[in-house]
Amino acid sequence: MALTFGRANAEYSRWIHIQRRQVGQLWQGRYRSCLLDESHLWNALCYVEQNPVRAGMTSCAWEWRWSSAAARIGLVLSDIPLDWSLWKERHDPETWRKVLELGLREAAFADRLRQATERGRPLGPVAFLENLELRLSRSVRPQRRGRKPKPAVAKEGLPNCATE
């Protein structure tokens, strides 16, 4: 996904620079993402919709012009195509408004989300990560740093203690 969005970012930036006859960075930093299990998805959505409030740009998430929060709580119709099906299975406008007013349930979630996003690691409970590793046939959790130990090899004529 990072490669796709990185390429889209590069092409869009190039187009804007040609149109405006400018040079330089268009975006701050590079694209970052992480996989989320469903429970973490709702926390992340709440976190993102509260960003303008935390930054002091507005007092309520649904007042921010570029946020989907106003559409989620039923104040406006969304002018962008959003898939509401999964959200509607779990939430309704009234409960989502309460979620935004109360904020995140877990103070440490924001730090864990930032860390997972910066590192490109999935975020979720152990069962989610194990399932993901099975499906991908590779580890998605951080491994110990440094050189991996060499497997024990028996010398000719000497027993291999690791195998006995």
Image (cartoon, rainbow, N blue to C red):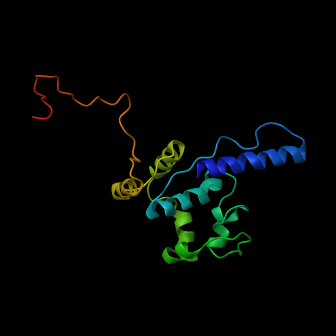
Res 162 quadrant in image: top left
Report x, y in % for residue 119: 50, 42
Res 49 quadrant in image: bottom right
User: Is 70 on the left or on the right of 141, as rendered?
Assistant: right
Name the residue furthest front: 156
Q: Residue at x 40, y 41 (%)?
A: 142
User: Is 69 on the left or on the right of 13, as rendered?
Assistant: left
Q: Residue at x 33, y 31 (%)?
A: 148
Report x, y in % for residue 151: 25, 31
Report x, y in % for residue 158: 11, 23
Q: Residue at x 53, y 69 (%)?
A: 98
Q: How many marks?
A: 0
Locate the C terminus by quadrant: top left
User: Is 85 on the left or on the right of 109, as rendered?
Assistant: right
Q: Is residue 55 visible?
A: no
Q: Is residue 18 above or below residue 132?
A: above
Q: Is residue 133 visible?
A: yes
Of residues 74 and 143, the one drawn nearer to the viewer in this rendering: 143
Of residues 122 and 136, the one drawn nearer to the viewer in this rendering: 136
